[in-house]
Image: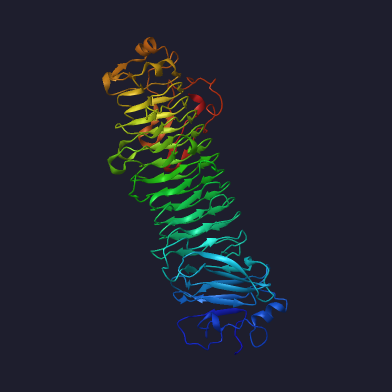
């Protein structure tokens, strides 16, 4: 074989005739033209055996397709890895089939797992020749990996089974930036299947899967990081986390147009998903999945515990943005924090009034410092139901709809909620600001403005009044129902009438809180606001701490000092 002009940079262009020398000017036509054996001109194995001082780089021509490759005898070292990357202009090159790497006493095969399936897996086989010790020594940069044939419509397209497998970006960092995984239309399961601990996936565009985009496997897919990725137009969820997984991160990702829900958490009754962090993400426009329930949610979770959903933007989610949709008491979502999110234009699929944030069969969650506004089809901004107890709603801005409630608790009366706390929120432009249909509820330090029929409405059950702990609220003007701020069933009350009838709200005031410009997202308090200094600070942490004056969410939503009311 003739000497290669630019060794160790190897160029391959599948559109040219065979017999090139592997330079950019005269490239090989296939992987098979590379001399991976010992001895002879351009032996890559000999190059590595002779103490290499640089990596071998295989450059694949953009816009071309390359069939199954076998890299024999030399796959790099930990210091000098073998790199497969793109050159030229146009679309990323496509590798169809598998990449086999031999050496170090074993053959590593990155391939479909067997005939008739679409599962990609890295396997180690006996045999091979020395020169490879870790499968981390192969990196793919800006290369598209596709399964070539449809197969039997089963399992996963790309499966990670070894915690040390990474793809690498242009900077040389061991991650997966610049790689696109596209499924054939018939692939089921996940495009990226995390089947081991300590997997990092960075910068992936994951689309058109007939199953999930990224999926963390039950019990073993823990301590993963999915960051800077995009999952879109997958038949199932863009990100799926299964029971028993813990300490996963979904960071700075965009997830959209996936069916049923963009993010799905399926914690089993015995093995909850714990320690999940979703932060800095944009979640929008899930596609409607038609089945037993017609749904399109931002995140739908059951069996999620001790996790955080924060600093993310959620919009155009037809069945609601964040849904702790526990499937019974044994799969509720408990001890989670939802904070600092921007949530709008969610709810309303099929003419129903889905809440933007829904808590079912779930306890001890904190919903704090979120801006939740403009519910789609006029549904509630937050709803608690089905025995959801001891949840805390604090420091939120809730700009609702005059068609429905800002916050409703105890929606499913056969399974009422209990002991939930709504403290220190700004509630604006709702049909009812808060609807109480549960026992032992706390409603304190809230500021209401421009609600239609009541700031606080209570179900007709007298038991709910006897256990209601409501006080230190700033009750603003109500345009309907005779302008009275309280309601019991169909009967409206002024603050004074309510104090006499129910015996609550002794320190509340019936005056508008004077938000500066709530219609434009400015919820700071004007000088002289009756809400300033009104709050009861005996309610305890975390309700007496909030964002500093001048803090803002996206879309220039400005907050006041939560300690002021």
Q: How is the image coloured?
A: rainbow
- The spot of residue 468 in percent (x, y) is 43, 18
Q: Which corner quadrant of the image does residue 124 belong to? A: bottom right
Quadrant including the N terminus: bottom right
**Residue nearest the observer in this picture, 166 or 522:** 166
- Whether residue 23 is visible, yes or no, is no
- The spot of residue 98 in percent (x, y) is 52, 72
Q: Is residue 287 positioned above or below 565 on the image? A: below
Left or right side of 442 for 492: left
**Residue nearest the observer in this picture, 110 or 457:** 110
- Farthest residue to the right: give it: 51
Query: Total of numbered circles in the picture?
Result: 0
- Farthest residue to the top: give it: 500
Q: Is residue 7 positioned above or below 437 on the image? A: below
**Residue nearest the observer in this picture, 316 or 544:** 316
- The spot of residue 364 in percent (x, y) is 52, 31
- Whether residue 536 is visible, yes or no, is yes
- The spot of residue 66 in percent (x, y) is 48, 76
> Residue at point 41% right, 41% down?
343
> Residue at point 62% right, 61% down?
164
């Amino acid at each position: 074989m003739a000497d290669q002009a630019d060794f160790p940079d190897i160029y391959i262009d599948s559109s040219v005739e065979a017999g090139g020398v592997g330079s950019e000017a005269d490239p090989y036509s296939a992987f098979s033209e590379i001399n991976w054996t010992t001895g002879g001109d351009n032996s890559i194995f000999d190059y590595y055996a002779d103490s290499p001082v640089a990596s071998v780089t295989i450059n694949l021509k953009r816009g071309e397709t390359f069939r199954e490759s076998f890299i024999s005898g030399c796959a790099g070292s930990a210091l000098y890895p073998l790199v497969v990357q793109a050159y030229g202009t146009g679309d990323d090159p496509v590798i169809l089939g598998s990449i086999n790497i031999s050496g170090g006493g074993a053959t590593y095969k990155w391939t479909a797992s067997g005939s008739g399936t679409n599962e990609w897996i890295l396997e180690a086989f006996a045999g091979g020749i020395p020169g490879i010790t870790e499968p981390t020594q192969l990196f793919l940069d800006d290369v598209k990996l596709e399964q070539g044939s449809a197969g039997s419509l089963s399992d996963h397209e790309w499966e990670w089974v070894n915690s040390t497998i990474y793809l690498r970006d242009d900077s040389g960092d061991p991650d997966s930036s610049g790689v696109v995984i596209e499924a054939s239309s018939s692939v089921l399961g996940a495009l990226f299947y995390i089947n081991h601990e300590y997997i990092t996936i960075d910068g992936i565009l994951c689309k058109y899967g007939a199953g999930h985009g990224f999926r963390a496997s039950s019990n073993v897919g823990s301590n993963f990081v999915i960051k800077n990725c995009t999952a879109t137009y997958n038949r199932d969820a863009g990100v799926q986390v299964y029971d028993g997984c813990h300490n996963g991160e979904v960071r700075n990702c965009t997830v959209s147009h996936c069916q049923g829900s963009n993010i799905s958490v399926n914690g089993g009754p015995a093995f909850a998903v714990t320690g999940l962090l979703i932060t800095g993400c944009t979640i929008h426009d899930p596609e409607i999945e038609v089945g037993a329930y017609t749904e399109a949610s931002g995140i739908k979770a059951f069996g999620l515990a001790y996790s955080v959903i924060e600093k993310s933007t959620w919009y155009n989610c037809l069945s609601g943005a964040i849904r702790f949709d526990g499937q019974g008491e044994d799969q509720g979502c408990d001890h989670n924090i939802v904070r600092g999110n921007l949530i709008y234009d969610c709810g309303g699929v099929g003419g129903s009034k889905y809440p933007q944030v829904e808590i079912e069969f779930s306890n001890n969650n904190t919903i704090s410092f979120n801006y939740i506004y403009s519910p789609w089809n006029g549904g509630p901004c937050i709803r608690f139901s089905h025995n959801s107890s001891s949840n805390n709603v604090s420091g939120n801005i809730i700009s609702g709809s005059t068609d429905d409630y800002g916050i409703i608790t105890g929606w499913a009366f056969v399974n009422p909620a209990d002991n939930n706390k709504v403290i220190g929120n700004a509630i604006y432009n709702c049909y009812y600001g808060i609807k109480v249909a549960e026992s032992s509820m706390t409603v304190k330090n809230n500021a209401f403005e421009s609600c239609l029929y009541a700031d606080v409405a209570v179900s007709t059950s007298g038991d709910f009044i006897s256990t209601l702990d409501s006080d230190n609220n700033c009750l603003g003007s109500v345009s309907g129902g005779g302008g009275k701020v309280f309601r019991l069933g169909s009967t409206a009350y002024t603050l004074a009438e309510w104090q006499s009838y129910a015996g609550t709200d002794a320190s509340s005031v019936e005056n508008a809180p004077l938000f500066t410009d709530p219609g434009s997202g400015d919820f700071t308090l004007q000088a002289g606001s009756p809400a300033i200094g009104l709050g009861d600070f005996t309610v305890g942490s975390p309700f007496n701490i909030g964002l500093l004056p001048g803090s803002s969410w996206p879309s220039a939503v400005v907050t006041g000092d939560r300690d002021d009311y």
